[in-house]
Amino acid sequence: MTRRDLGWAIAGILVVFFAAMVSMNVVVTALPVIVGELHGSQIQYSWVVTATLLANASSTPVWGKLADMMSKKALFQTANVIFFLSSLAAGFAQNMEMLIAARFVQGIGLGGLTALAMAILASIVSPRERGRYSGYIGACLATATALGPLIGGVTVDTLGWRWCFFVGVPLSLFALVLISFTLKVPVIRSSGRIDYLGALLLVTASGLLLMWFSFAGTEESFAWVSWPSAALVLTALLLLAVFVLVERRVSNPIIQLRMLLSRTTFLAALSSASIAVCLFGMPAFLGQYFQIGRGLSPTESGLLILPLVLGNMLGALISGRLITRYGRWKPYIVAGSLLQTTGMFLLATIGAGTDYLFILSMLFIIGLGFGAQMQNLMLAVQNTVQVTRVGQASALIAFFRVFGGAAGTSILGSVMAIQVVGVSVAEVNGSAPSPAYAEASGTMFLVAACLTLPAVAANLLIKEVPLRTTV
């Protein structure tokens, strides 16, 4: 590709990625209002996010496998169409069940956009140069994550929460047209058939585990040690065992389990799952803390989340530039994990009267640490596989990242539900600050901090492999 063609290709990827992530994140500050108006529970609150992440995680390996078998551009466009149609459905939702279902379909589209964006990038840029462009995608993700909650807050305070889902539709349509005319990516096909049985087993087992994380231990559901709990866990483990057997027998498995035998891939997958709670779980629960716990408006809540995303953006851009210049990537993921975990443990001290400056400082540090890790862990894995397997490799890391985020969100939602029994989620928009929610948030963030500890160990143990200078 010429430099001009490459520029248009990257621009097209960034536009559609930005449109999807804005649509994904506008719900963060709108959730307390949405759940209050639709009379949802604390568990349903977390499942508005979890449903999207579950579909995202489960569909990502399928998209990755398809990317190695057919046109990545056509798949990218298909994922975009799925995403904006489901955004319309979410905007017209009449109850929590319909909203969660629409968000599940959104996750399918988002899974495709996430996996295919990285697969396309890996098909047109060498690993040595990819650090810079991965930084662009990380910065795009951070910017969209920053604008999403802010746009959501302003939209809720002016037009109403339904427009939070409609706002991304024009952007998605514009991106669809731009991609059609600008993106040129080589079609590198591999033979074989899609492992649909493996995909079905994977999504079912993942769903059962997430249900267990969400409902176990809550007053209205069942105890951690109980027959329903045992049934969910044993069934999920049985399905996972069958999944492993199926993947070892089929000629084209949905997930190449052999990739996990690589030390780099295994540790990067573990680290990606560990840090994902920061990206997927924290913004939603921060919105709940600021609005219900401290009595702020959705717009004010969106503004206060900005330091988290600003740190994310700077961490991604700076580390990406330095990796391209010097060819080293391990120092940045190690430093990033230490920053993120330290910031999370300090954030766990918050309560009903915590100084806002302290909270904003911690959010910036956490975002900085996360930004230095996310795309660089993907880069480390892509550097170890051939271009014909880059789609599956990208999807594998994306799966662990999103499943880790979904599991973390479910666990944090369960922790909140246990602590705020009897307190209404409808106490929003600054009308009735709830000290119970504010104090419970500190315990919830302590659990979140513990969930990031495996990333520190994994990043320290990962072996640095020199970056290739060819695709």
Image (cartoon, helix red, strand yellow):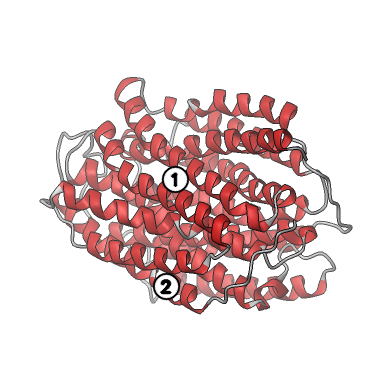
Left or right, 113 with respect to 153, comes to: right
The residue under label 1 is which amino acid type? Answer: Val
On the rendered image, what quadrant is the N terminus found in?
Answer: top right
N-term-proximal mark, 2 vs 1: 1
Q: Is residue 402 visible?
A: no
Which of labels 2 and 1 is toward the front? 2
Whether residue 313 can be seen here: yes
Q: Quadrant of the C terminus?
A: bottom right
Task: Check the image and name the residue furthest to the top.
Answer: 159
Q: Amino acid at mark 2?
A: Val
In percent of width and height, residue 406 lies at 48, 57
The quadrant in which residue 445 appears is bottom left
Q: CA distance from mark 2 to mark 1?
A: 29 Å
Left or right: 198 as drawn, with respect to 93: right
Question: Could you say whether the residue bearing mark 1 is in a helix, strand or loop?
Answer: helix
**Residue 9 shown left or right of residue 285 in the figure:** right
Disc marking residue 447: none
Relative image position of residue 319 (x, y in whole percent):
48, 56
For image coordinates 67% across by 26% down, the residue present is 178
Residue situated in front as seen by the camera: 10 or 303: 10
User: Residue 325, relative to residue 107: is it above or below?
Assistant: below
How busy is the neighbourhood of tag 1: few (under 14 within 10 Å), some, or many (20 plus)?
many
- Up-down relation of residue 240 to residue 101 (above or below): below
Residue labelled with disc 2? 456
Nearer the observer, 371 or 50: 371
Residue neighbourhood size for the residue with mark 2, other residues' Cα within 10 Å, grouped as few (<14), some (14–19), many (≥20): many
The image position of residue 84, as x and y in percent, is 59, 31
Q: How many marks?
A: 2
Give the image location of residue 329, x and y in percent: 53, 65
CB within 8 Å, label 2 to label 1: no
Residue that label 1 marks: 48
